[in-house]
Structures are given as structure tokens and as C-alpha cells.
Image (tube, rainbow, N blue to C red):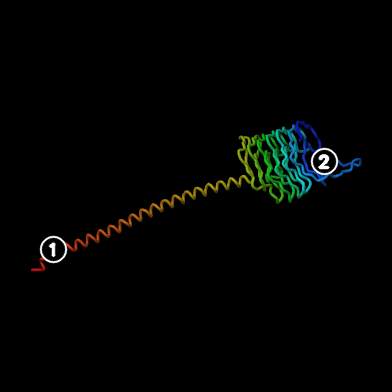
């Protein structure tokens, strides 16, 4: 638990970091007086970060990052932080191949004026697992661009993988976004749920990336529903026409039958009228 701290004005690596332990530990300081000794292999799991992280120009405000294959950063919660004026806001990432970042939550934070994006859920190396992370109820404003985007511009929330392995199962919900070009950007991600976010008129593109494709899918679905409605209407019309045709056919047959009957009666009457004349 990392709670109640204020981290201001660091020059090197930024604010607060969580990482797994093992052969590669970015927290180890190596020098001629203190050789680096890797720690025992352990994940970083079930931690809470709730602090103020301000004006750390050298790195991320808060980073939850996996460096050791087979360990991972799991089920951590970054909640109720003020993250302002850092090189990057809040990052959940896998910068080393074969690592994992699973079920981490970035919730109810205020993240403003980062030099790059506000929140980054990032599968930043190949053969990694970034799965089931959540970005919920944050307030974001005035953050900078994500340079992994095809067209970088100031961005509140990025969910992406620059590798062939997509980020999967991310929830982006009920965030409030202001003063950005992009609200939520989704690139090379699967099963992303984006719902109930609020972006005011200062946000030029509330959704970019896969969300555009989803919009196209929704439009296509609407068109299909309209087409299905039209087909149903056509089918109902055909059924009505068939019913009318059946009625007309029945009436036609009835008219023919009546004509036959009347014709028979007329023939019979005619014969009866001719019979006396023939007897004379």
C-alpha cells in the first residue's frame, strides 16, 4: 500500500512505480559501491496507490509495469490520486517481452497537464499479456499526445499495443474528459468496452481508432435492421397480396360455379319451353 504521499519535482524516473521482482528490477541502483543483485521472483499484486504526484518531468506520474517474465503486475488499484504536470500520467504497461499486466484498476483519479497522454494501457513489447484492466471514473484534462498513435495529438486515455499482440478486455467507463484532441484512443485492442464517458465540446474527437470501426459496425447494424424491417414489410405486403389473391381466386371459382349453375338452369328452362312445340 502506497498511500498519503506527495511526490514533487523528481528529475530522474518520475513519481511512483510498481513492478514485479526478479532478474530485471528497474528499482535496483547499481554502482561500484553497490553491485546490483536481483531479488527473488515475485509478482507485484494487490497494491493500492493513493497519493499526490506533481511536476515530475523526468518520467511517469504513476507506473504499474511488468519487467520479469512469469511474474507480472496483477490486481493493483491506482485510486484517488492527483497526478499533475508529469512527463506521462498513469501507465499500465509491459515493456519487456513475455511479461503481463492483468486486472489492474485506474479509478477516480485526477490526471492533468501531462506532457504525453493521461492514462496509457499499453502492451509495449511483443509476446505480452495485457488483460482485464479498467479505467473508471477519472477526470482528465490538458494532457499531451501519445506518439504510438497513427496521428499523435493530445490524448486523455490510450488503450493500445504497438506490437502484434493486442491489449484485451479493457473497460473504459464514466471518465470525464476536457481540453484534449482525442478522448479515448483504441488501437490494436480486442474486447474493449467503452461506455458512459463524458467529453465536452473542447474534445475534438471523443473516440478514435477501433471505436470508429465500432461506430461503422453500429451504423451497418442499423442499416441491417432497417433492411430487415423493409423485408418484413415486403413480406407482410406479399402475404396480404396472397390473401387477396386467394380471396379473388375463391370468388372467381364461386363465380364460375354460379355461372355453371345458372347456365344449367337456363338450359333446362329452354328445353322445357321447346318441348310443347315439338309435340305438335
Q: Is residue 59 above or below residue 213?
A: above
Task: Indicate the secondary structure of the residue bearing disc 1.
Answer: helix
Quadrant of the rendered image containing residue 175: top right
The image shows residue 213, relative to residue 88, as above or below, that is below
Name the residue at the right extreme.
33
Between discs 1 and 2, the one toward the N terminus = 2
Left or right of 186 on screen, residue 269: left
CB under 8 Å between discs 1 and 2: no
Question: Can you give x and y, in whole percent of width and height, for residue 124 in the image?
Answer: 73, 46
Q: Residues within 10 Å of mark 2 (few under 14, many from 20)?
A: few
Find numbered disc 2 in the image and state the secondary structure of the residue it sits on: loop
Question: Label 1, on which residue?
Answer: 273
Q: Nearer the viewer, residue 77 or 194?
A: 77
- Asked if residue 87 can be seen in this view, the reply is no
Q: Quadrant of the C terminus?
A: bottom left
Quarter containing the N terminus:
top right
In the foreground, 212 or 103: 103
Total numbered labels: 2
Decide if residue 23 is on the left or right side of residue 261. Answer: right
Q: Residue at x 43, y 52 (%)?
A: 235
Q: Position of residue 39 (x, y in %)?
A: 84, 44
Label 2, on which residue?
27
* Image quadrant in which you'd find residue 90: top right
**Residue for point 30% across, 56% down:** 251
Please give left or right for residue 130 compared with residue 21 in the image: left
Residue drawn at x 65%, y 42% is 171
* Dot label at residue 257: none
Which residue is located at x 81 percent, y 46 percent?
41
Amino acid at each position: 500500500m502506497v498511500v498519503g504521499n506527495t511526490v514533487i519535482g523528481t528529475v530522474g524516473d518520475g513519481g511512483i512505480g510498481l513492478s514485479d521482482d526478479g532478474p530485471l528490477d528497474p528499482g535496483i541502483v547499481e554502482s561500484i559501491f553497490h553491485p546490483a543483485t536481483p531479488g527473488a521472483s515475485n509478482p507485484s499484486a494487490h497494491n493500492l496507490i493513493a497519493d499526490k504526484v506533481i511536476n515530475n518531468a523526468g518520467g511517469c506520474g504513476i507506473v504499474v509495469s511488468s519487467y520479469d517474465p512469469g511474474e507480472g503486475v496483477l490486481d493493483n488499484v491506482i485510486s484517488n490520486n492527483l497526478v499533475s504536470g508529469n512527463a506521462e500520467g498513469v501507465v499500465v504497461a509491459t515493456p519487456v517481452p513475455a511479461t503481463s499486466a492483468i486486472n489492474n484498476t485506474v479509478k477516480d483519479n485526477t490526471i492533468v497537464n501531462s506532457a504525453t497522454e493521461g492514462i496509457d494501457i499499453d502492451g509495449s513489447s511483443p509476446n505480452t499479456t495485457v488483460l482485464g484492466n479498467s479505467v473508471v471514473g477519472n477526470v482528465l484534462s490538458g494532457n499531451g499526445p501519445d506518439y504510438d498513435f497513427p496521428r499523435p495529438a493530445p490524448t486523455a486515455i490510450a488503450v493500445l499495443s504497438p506490437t502484434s499482440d493486442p491489449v484485451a478486455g479493457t473497460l473504459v467507463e464514466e471518465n470525464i474528459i476536457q481540453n484534449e484532441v482525442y478522448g479515448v484512443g483504441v488501437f490494436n485492442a480486442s474486447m474493449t468496452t467503452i461506455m458512459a464517458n463524458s467529453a465536452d465540446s473542447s474534445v475534438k474527437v471523443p473516440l478514435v481508432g477501433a471505436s470508429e470501426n465500432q461506430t461503422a459496425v453500429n451504423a451497418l447494424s442499423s442499416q441491417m435492421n432497417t433492411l430487415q424491417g423493409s423485408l418484413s414489410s415486403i413480406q407482410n405486403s406479399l402475404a396480404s397480396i396472397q390473401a387477396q389473391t386467394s380471396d379473388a381466386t375463391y370468388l372467381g371459382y364461386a363465380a364460375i360455379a354460379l355461372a355453371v349453375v345458372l347456365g344449367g338452369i337456363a338450359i333446362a328452362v329452354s328445353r322445357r319451353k321447346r318441348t310443347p312445340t315439338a309435340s305438335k
